Image: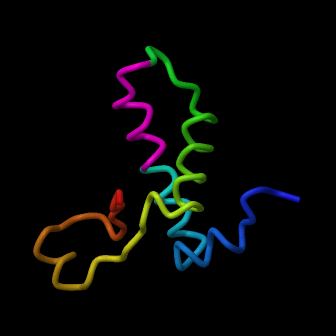
């Protein structure tokens, strides 16, 4: 059995697509901003991102149409609590 369970992660993200985009975006942030480690393995960064989504450290929310059109941003924003 996979941990964390995929169906629980999808509930937090809304859709599988949203989960994948959010996890990838957060993993890129981890890789690009990790000051303590010179090189971070991408699989470790993805695992950390998934765990943050699962435990609620990372909250995924969709932009409204107004926010999307005004800011011309990506559909998913990650909010760190």
Q: Residue furthest bottom?
A: 65
Instruction: Considering the whole magenta stretch, tell me its main secondary structure.
Output: helix
| Residue 65 is covered by the magenta coloring | no
| Percent position of residue 41, x then y | 58, 26
Residue plotted at (53% across, 60% down):
53
Q: Is residue 16 left or right of residue 24?
A: right
Front residue of 78 and 21:
78
| Percent position of residue 58, x then y | 44, 59
Up the image or down, 38 lies above or below 71; here it is: above
| Residue 35 is covered by the magenta coloring | yes
| Percent position of residue 36, x then y | 40, 19
Q: Residue furthest left?
A: 70
Stretch in magenta:
26-36
Q: Is residue 69 left or right of residue 3?
A: left
Up the image or down, 42 lies above or below 78; here it is: above
Front residue of 68 and 47:
47
**Quarter location, residue 4:** bottom right
- Locate the N terminus and report the quarter of the image it occupies: bottom right
**Quarter location, residue 65:** bottom left
Q: Residue furthest right?
A: 1
Up the image or down, 40 lies above or below 10; here it is: above
| Percent position of residue 45, x then y | 54, 37
**Quarter location, residue 78:** bottom left
Residue plotted at (50% across, 50% down):
24
How many marks overall?
0
- Locate the C terminus and report the quarter of the image it occupies: bottom left
Residue plotted at (56% across, 77% down):
15
């Amino acid at each position: 059995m996979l941990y964390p369970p995929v169906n629980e992660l999808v509930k937090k993200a809304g859709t599988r697509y949203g989960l994948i985009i959010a996890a990838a975006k957060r993993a890129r942030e981890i890789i690009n901003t990790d000051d303590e480690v010179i090189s971070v393995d991408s699989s470790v960064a993805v695992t950390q991102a998934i765990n943050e989504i699962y435990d609620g450290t990372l909250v995924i929310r969709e932009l409204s149409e107004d926010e999307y059109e005004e800011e011309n941003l990506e559909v998913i924003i990650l909010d760190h609590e």
